[in-house]
């Protein structure tokens, strides 16, 4: 028998260490220490009800266990085999106790569809993919379904593009199918460029065949025979595994001519991008593949009409493709039962920032931010307070406490002033300055703007300069209105998605954290203590013992004082590097 | 291996693959064929998954434990990389996080040999889609 005690940060903060010690003592008292082992595990992902103790093999799941409960668990459950009822999880809706963890709702919070094989199969072994229904969907499509049937199935599933825009995939395919041409193309957009996002990379590294299979299915339904994967050269492992996968699929006859004995032919090649953010926009991506500069062009014409080399081209994102084989295998009606009314299926998110369980998660659409951040994500690092979460990367906005219970789907996020984007989620705590955050994203956009249209090229630069001024304490109240006006103009007049969304971080922080902007402008203070130019380092006289440690570590000689006398920091010389604070053992230096 | 020419070929191949895996699981000697998967996505490799995988292969061979060590993609637990999944015959697979070579050694000695669990288990917190066909 094993007693598994959660050792996640949240549960540890609630004394799960003491639970382990107490359980061990109780077992020794009963002479059971050799039969029953107490183990500390990683996070169960149910931090809200922590600390968690799970008994294996009977799968009993105790929540909110206190160190003093150890005696009862050992005496009742371990010795007598009776569950301790009062510690069992109670279903909040049915008010019933649930003893078996497999039946708990929270286990259903994550469903792996796009990530179904990620971390299960060897991505360099096609046989393992086949063992898990691989290429079965393609086989069925080619031998049992007409192209239009496939498109109808995708339409019915309600699948929407996972790259950010959320355009219905089935409709996109239908348009590409209807445009006649001697040659058509299927393109996979693997140009994942949001800071902090790595969903697509993980799928390509963990399950490359899923994307190849889906592209072939798309080729069959749109009557295209060539597939191209546009992937950034800075994803070497994903490229390596894709190459292996393509070779294996060709060897098995799953790519090439006469696939499954039919007259359908399809082959896939790779195209490398140099890592420009704008090339995630489909027209830029196509120009880049053609060997031209990665610059967008006005739509229409859409790629489905005139794309790669002027031919009808269907462009979908990696995660979108990864969903396709499952929809074919399990049916549109299985898929469209998951999710919300207008957003079906699941979404993969890359959790990053000030969160305990940084990683990759896949949740049904309609899951709330609270569930994602506090249950699956294990809450905020070091017990700090949640401040905001940035979704949609540089194109999205930040969401705050008041949005925590909003069900995540395409439309709700837009309504809340952000967007789904590709699925990066960057969590910020009380120590993060929202003006600096907006400035960080603008810095990124200025760097990544292709420069073709002036609103994006010049406007974003001006936005950045305004934000920079504010973080230096040189801003005026009029600047805040200027930020708003300019943001609106950039949004309205930019050529492509990059410029149309780049002011979003500014607008959403202005909406949600206006006070913080005002503090920077009028009080010349950064409430989060992040903006260096607005901070002063001072020594608290009562605490300073005159050990000289700070003066010795100061790189610019800004600290003066005699041994065993109170020291002093000259704000004119101080560069606010923070070295003195780290060195001081007496908490005698504060930042304001 | 032969090319797949028809859907029937693929189905047969799938069955073959399934049986292969099955035989592996039902080996008569229970200590046979421990299956270990090492999360080898960029994040895993950056945290040292390659060294762990090399160590596992070498150590298991030296200690005469019949095991299959394979690589796999990202399990999603970026905060706890490198991660490995260990499946002993007839038992549920268990995922361990923060596995360096020292931890790997402990897993072999304690979990694989003696069946004792060691710290650092990552509990399953998601549903898979194969179950509810």
Image (spheres, coloured by chain):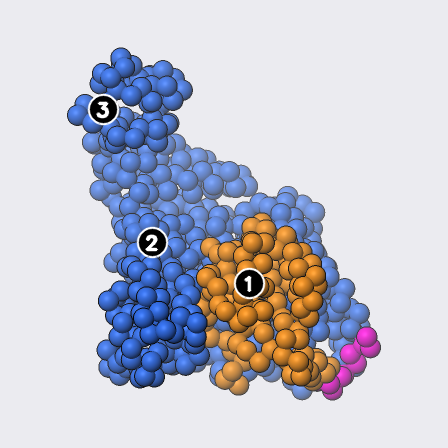
Chain colours: A blue, B orange
Q: Nearer the viewer, residue B116 or A352?
A: B116
Say what secondary structure mark 1 lies in. Answer: helix
The answer to which of A273 and A326 lies nearer the viewer is A326
Q: Position of residue A231 (x, y in %)?
A: 63, 54
Pointer 1: what residue? B107
Q: Earlier in the sequence, mark 2 or mark 3?
A: 2
Quarter-wise, where is residue A72 in the image?
Answer: bottom left
Q: Residue, x 55% and y 60% (percent of image)?
A: B106
Query: Residue A91 in the image: x percent, y percent?
Result: 28, 79
Mark 2 belongs to which subunit? Answer: A
* Residue located beneath label 3 in the image: A544
Part of the protein shown in magenta = B1-12
Q: Are marks 1 and 3 on the same chain?
A: no
Residue identified by numbered label 2: A380
- Specify whether residue A104 is in view: no
Measuring 37% from the left and 64% from the top, which residue is drawn there?
A: A6
For disc 3, the chain is: A
Separation of residues labelled 2 and 3 (CA atoms):
33 Å
Q: Residue at x 43, y 52 (%)?
A: A352
Looking at the image, is mark 1 or mark 3 nearer the viewer? 1
Residue shown at the point (35%, 66%) measured from the top left: A24
Q: Nearer the viewer, residue A357 or A495?
A: A357
Q: Residues within 10 Å of mark 2 (few under 14, many from 20)?
A: many
- Residue A498 belongs to the span the image colors magenta: no
Q: Nearer the viewer, residue A84 or A100?
A: A84
Quadrant of the frame with the C terminus of chain A = top left
In the rendered image, the vertical position of residue A94 relative to residue A486, given as above or below: below
Which corner quadrant of the image does residue B57 belong to? bottom right
Q: Is residue A507 above or below residue A240?
A: above
**Is residue A112 visible in the rendered structure shown here?**
yes
Query: Quick check: B81 above or below B24?
Result: above
């Amino acid at each position: 028998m094993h007693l598994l005690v959660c050792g996640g940060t949240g549960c540890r903060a609630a004394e799960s260490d003491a639970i382990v010690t107490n359980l061990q003592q109780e077992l020794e008292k009963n002479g059971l220490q050799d039969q029953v082992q107490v183990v500390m595990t990683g996070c169960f992902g149910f931090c809200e009800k922590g600390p968690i103790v799970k008994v294996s093999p009977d799968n009993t799941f105790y929540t909110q266990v206190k160190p003093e409960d150890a005696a009862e668990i050992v005496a009742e459950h371990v010795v007598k085999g009776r569950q301790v009822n009062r510690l069992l999880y109670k279903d909040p809706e049915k008010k019933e106790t649930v003893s078996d963890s497999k039946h708990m709702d929270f286990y259903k919070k994550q469903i792996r569809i796009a990530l179904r094989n990620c971390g299960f199969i060897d991505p360099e072994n096609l046989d393992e993919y086949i063992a898990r229904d691989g290429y079965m969907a393609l086989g069925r499509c080619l031998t049992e379904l007409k192209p239009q049937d496939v498109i109808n199935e995708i339409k019915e599933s309600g699948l929407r593009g996972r790259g950010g825009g959320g355009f219905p995939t089935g409709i996109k395919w239908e348009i590409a199918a209807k445009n006649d041409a001697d040659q058509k193309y299927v393109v996979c957009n693997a140009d994942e460029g949001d800071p902090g996002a790595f969903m697509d990379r993980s799928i390509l590294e963990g399950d490359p065949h899923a994307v190849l299979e889906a592209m072939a299915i798309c080729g069959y339904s749109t009557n295209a025979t060539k597939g191209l994967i546009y992937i950034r050269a800075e994803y070497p492992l994903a490229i390596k595994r894709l190459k292996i996968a393509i070779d294996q699929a060709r060897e098995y006859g799953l790519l090439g001519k006469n696939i499954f004995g039919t007259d359908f032919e399809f082959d896939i090649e790779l195209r490398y991008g140099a890592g420009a953010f704008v090339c995630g926009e489909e027209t830029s991506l196509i120009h880049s593949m053609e060997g031209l500069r990665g610059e967008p062009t006005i739509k229409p014409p859409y790629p489905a009409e005139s794309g790669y080399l002027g031919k009808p081209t269907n462009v979908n994102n990696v995660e979108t493709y990864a969903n396709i084989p499952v929809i074919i295998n399990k049916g549109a009606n299985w898929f469209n039962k998951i999710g919300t009314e207008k957003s079906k299926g699941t979404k993969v998110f890359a959790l990053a920032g000030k969160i305990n369980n940084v990683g990759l998660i896949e949740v049904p659409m309609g899951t709330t931010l609270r569930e994602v951040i506090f249950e699956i994500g294990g809450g905020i690092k070091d017990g700090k307070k949640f401040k905001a979460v940035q979704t949609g990367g540089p194109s999205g906005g930040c969401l705050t406490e008041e949005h925590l219970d909003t069900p995540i789907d395409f439309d709700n996020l837009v309504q809340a002033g952000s967007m789904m984007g590709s699925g990066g989620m960057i969590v910020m705590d009380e120590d993060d300055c929202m003006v600096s955050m907006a400035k960080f994203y603008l810095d990124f956009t200025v760097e990544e703007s292709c420069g073709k249209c002036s609103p994006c090229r010049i406007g974003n630069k001006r936005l950045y300069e305004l934000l920079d001024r504010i973080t230096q304490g040189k801003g005026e109240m009029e600047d805040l209105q200027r930020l708003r006006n300019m943001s609106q103009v950039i949004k309205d007049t930019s050529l492509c998605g990059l410029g149309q969304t780049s002011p979003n971080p500014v607008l959403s922080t202005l909406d949600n954290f206006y006070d913080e902007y005002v503090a920077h402008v009028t009080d010349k203070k950064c409430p989060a203590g992040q903006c260096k130019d607005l901070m002063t380092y001072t020594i608290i006289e009562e605490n300073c013992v005159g050990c000289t440690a700070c003066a010795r570590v100061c790189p610019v000689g800004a600290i003066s004082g005699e041994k065993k006398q109170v020291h002093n920091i000259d704000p004119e010389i101080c560069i606010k590097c923070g070295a003195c604070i780290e060195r001081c053992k007496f908490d005698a230096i504060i930042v304001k | 291996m032969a090319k797949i020419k028809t859907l029937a070929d693929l189905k047969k191949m799938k069955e073959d693959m399934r049986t292969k895996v099955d035989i592996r699981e039902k080996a008569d000697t229970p200590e046979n064929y421990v299956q270990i998967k090492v999360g080898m996505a960029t994040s895993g490799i950056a945290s040292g998954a390659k060294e762990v995988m090399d160590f596992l292969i070498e150590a298991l061979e030296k200690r005469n434990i019949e095991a299959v060590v394979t690589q796999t993609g990202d399990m999603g637990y970026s905060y706890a990389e490198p991660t490995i999944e260990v499946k002993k015959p007839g038992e549920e697979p268990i995922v361990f996080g923060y596995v360096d070579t020292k931890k790997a050694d402990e897993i072999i000695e304690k979990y694989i040999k003696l069946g004792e669990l060691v710290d650092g288990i990552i509990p399953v917190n998601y549903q898979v889609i194969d179950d509810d066909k």
